[in-house]
Image (cartoon, rainbow, N blue to C red):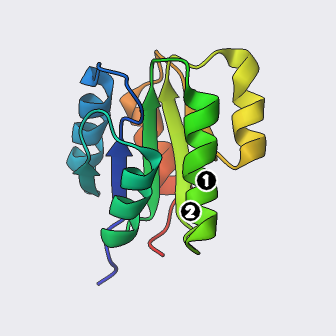
Amino acid sequence: MARKIRILVAKPGLDGHDRGARIIARAFRDAGFEVIYTGLHQTPEQIVSAAIQEDVDLIGLSSLAAAHLYLFQKVIDLLKSQGADDIMLVGGGIIPEKDVDKLKAMGVREIFPPGSSLEAIVDWVHKNVKPR
């Protein structure tokens, strides 16, 4: 039996709103994925440490506080420095459209803006993420 896809959902930085992150974590769980939600105010170091310890296949970062370019890059840099850059990274939240291409150029595989359907996000994971 194949291992389930493991997903870490995290809220980096000082952002204090996690309703969307909790909703997507629940949607991932309901879709049959194993989900770890780190809670609010996580540093990139905490997120990467948890991702490696939990042996996840995907990290989903939620950002509403406009620090996504810095925080997402920091997570990518830490994954690379720890030899874990095979863990995929996606993001969601309030991310200006002008930043989407920058984030993808950094290595973020997909950005899900407000209004993205849970079904579409889960479907994207099914099509693009395999257990490592």
Expressed as whole percent of the image width and height from the top left, the position of residue 37 reads 25, 46
Crowding around mark 2 (Cα neighbors within 10 Å: few <14, some 14 to 19, many 20+) is many
Dots 2, 1 in contact, CB < 8 A: yes
Three-letter amino acid code at the position of disc 1: Ile
Q: 105 left or right of 8?
A: right
Residue 59 rendering spot, x and y as whole percentages? 45, 51
Instruction: Give, as a three-letter code, the residue at label 2.
Output: Leu
**Going by the image, does 44 lie left or right of 39?**
right
Left or right placement of residue 106 versus residue 125 in this view? right
Q: Residue 93's x, y, as percent?
A: 47, 22
Residue 60 sits in quarter: top left
Q: Residue at x 44, y 58 (%)?
A: 48
Q: Above or below — where is 44 with respect to 79?
A: above
Is 30 or 60 nearer to us in this picture?
Answer: 60
Q: How many marks?
A: 2
Label 1 neighbour load within 10 Å: few <14, some 14-19, many 20+? many
66 vs 52: above or below:
above
The residue to which callout 1 is attached is: 76
Q: Is residue 6 above or below residue 36?
A: below
Which secondary structure, mark 1?
A: helix
Question: Quarter of the image holding residue 56?
Answer: bottom left
Task: Please provide percent x and percent y for residue 113.
Answer: 53, 21
Q: Disc 2 designates what residue?
A: 79
Alpha carbon distance from label 2 to label 1: 5 Å
- Local secondary structure at mark 2: helix
User: Could you tell me which residue is drawn at 46 percent across and 47 percent down?
Assistant: 44
Location of the N terminus (image quadrant): bottom left
* Residue found at x 36% / y 35%: 11
* Residue 73 lies in quadrant: top right
**Where 2 sits versus 131, above or below?**
below
